[in-house]
Image: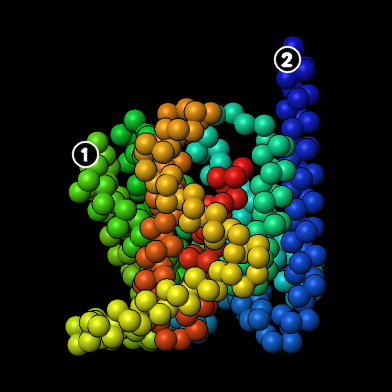
């Protein structure tokens, strides 16, 4: 009996590796088809200096103070994800293509983890990976080229998915020791990631704070946990600023932001014009979701499923899920809606390439659809 169980485990692991490998090849093929566009238009600028930075500072005797960043190095965002590829003997072009495949695999693994967190029960790994790979090949690869690029903003979004999953875990954790451990880990990790990419604060930490404030006001059962989450977000932002201040050569993200205090000034001076501009940008964002049928279908499914599933009475109609899974699915739906809405409204007045800073809003609906369909 033990031998059968062991052989079944080995078969499941082998099947999962095969499915993941096939999915990586799909991503690699997609990146390979776009390679001329990447290299001709210098879309891969992150990898112009990242390999040299790793060789000089992480693997060599160089000093970080000898480097100049605008505004920060991606030490805790892109570099940890790129490092496994850097250790392989690849040219810069092939390393870029390999990193595209790795970004797809990272996303697949995080989606698999979110499915496990929501289901909270043993699942057939090969079957889940097949479903995730299929839905990802249909939807994820048709959002935009960010998923194919060595782009540190996308790596920040991947770390953000970990934080959103941690919220789902916190919701039903009964042990206060485990709760405290998760909150401390979120504060430290949030500080590290935030110091490497300040957009992580706007994309993930501020929506988490909004959700926590909502829970404090309207959900009595988890008020203490929600207050702990608020403290965690504040601590993460403070730590991010402290870690960033340790860099010798840096640019101030507040000074060089394209909005700064102008956003508040525009709101106070011309509320009507401010609201019209925001409404116009929301319309632009919605139209951008329908640039191709796959992305449009994913966004439509996100809106039609996340909004109703954010309400407990409708979630309870999903009889094939147990009570805990229904609760986590409702929370995941609400979290996804908040992240998308706050990102769209928050960046609606960003006057420098607003689509460049909409990765969380563009990819969150697709991630939601992939996870929920699976």
Which colour scheme appears in the figure?
rainbow
What percent of the width, then of the height, locates residue 311? 37, 43
Specify the quadrant that holds the N terminus: top right
> Which residue lies at the image location 51% right of the left edge and 55% below the top edge?
302
Residue 244 lies, with reference to residue 297, above or below; the image says below
Quick one: label 1, few (<14), some, or many (20+) residues within 10 Å?
few
Q: At which x and y percent is residue 349?
A: 37, 81
Q: Are marks 1 and 2 in contact (CB under 8 Å)?
A: no
Element class at badge 2: helix
Residue tagged 2 = 2
Q: Earlier in the sequence, mark 1 or mark 2?
A: 2
Q: Is residue 174 left or right of residue 120?
A: left
Q: Quadrant of residue 280?
A: bottom left
Between marks 1 and 2, how big is the CA–CA gap? 47 Å
Crowding at mark 2 (Cα within 10 Å: few <14, some 14-19, many 20+): few
Q: Relative to 316, is 167 above or below?
A: below
Residue 301: quarter of image? bottom right
Can residue 252 be seen here? The reply is: no
Residue 231's disc is none
Q: In the figure, is residue 294 to the left or right of 335?
A: right
- Secondary structure under the numbered disc 1 in the rendered image: helix
Report the mark closest to the observer, 1 or 2.
1
Residue plotted at (65% across, 69% down): 292
- Which residue is denoted by mark 1 in the rendering? 220
Q: Nearer the viewer, residue 176 or 163?
A: 163
Determine whether 167 is above or below 270 in the image: above
What residue sits 23% from the left and 82% below the top? 271
Q: Position of residue 104 (x, y in %)?
A: 67, 58
The image quadrant where one finds the C terminus is top right
Foreground pick, 144 / 299: 299
């Amino acid at each position: 009996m033990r031998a059968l169980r062991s052989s079944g485990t080995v078969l499941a692991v082998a099947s999962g590796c095969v499915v993941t490998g096939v999915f990586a090849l799909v991503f690699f093929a997609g990146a390979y088809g776009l390679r001329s566009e990447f290299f001709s238009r210098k879309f891969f600028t992150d990898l112009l200096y990242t390999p040299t930075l790793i060789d000089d500072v992480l693997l060599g005797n160089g000093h970080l103070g000898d480097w100049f960043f605008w505004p920060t190095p991606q030490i805790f965002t892109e570099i940890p994800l790129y490092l496994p590829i850097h250790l392989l003997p690849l040219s810069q072009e092939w390393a870029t293509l390999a990193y595209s495949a790795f970004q797809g695999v990272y996303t697949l693994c995080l989606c698999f983890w979110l499915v496990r967190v929501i289901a909270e029960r043993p699942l057939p790994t090969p079957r889940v990976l097949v479903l995730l790979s299929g839905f990802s090949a249909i939807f994820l690869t048709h959002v935009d080229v960010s998923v194919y690029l060595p782009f540190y903003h996308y790596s920040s979004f991947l770390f953000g998915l970990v934080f959103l999953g941690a919220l789902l875990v916190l919701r039903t954790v009964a042990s206060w020791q485990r709760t405290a451990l998760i909150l401390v880990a979120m504060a430290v990790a949030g500080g590290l990631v935030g110091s490497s990419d300040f957009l992580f604060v706007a994309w993930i930490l501020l929506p988490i704070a909004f959700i926590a404030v909502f829970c404090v006001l309207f959900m009595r059962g988890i008020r203490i946990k929600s207050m702990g989450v608020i403290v965690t977000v504040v601590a993460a932002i403070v730590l991010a600023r402290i870690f960033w201040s340790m860099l010798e050569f840096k640019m101030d993200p507040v000074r060089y932001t394209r909005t700064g205090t102008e956003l508040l000034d525009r709101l106070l001076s011309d509320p009507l014009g401010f609201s019209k501009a925001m409404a116009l940008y929301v319309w632009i964002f919605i139209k951008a979701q329908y640039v191709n049928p796959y992305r449009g279908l994913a966004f439509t499914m996100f809106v039609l499923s996340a909004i109703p599933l954010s309400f407990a009475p409708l979630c309870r109609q999903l009889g094939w899920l147990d009570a805990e899974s229904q609760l986590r699915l409702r929370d995941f739906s609400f979290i996804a809606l908040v992240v998308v809405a706050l990102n769209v409204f928050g960046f609606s007045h960003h006057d420098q390439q607003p689509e460049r800073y909409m990765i969380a809003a563009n990819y969150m609906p697709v991630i939601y659809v992939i996870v929920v369909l699976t």
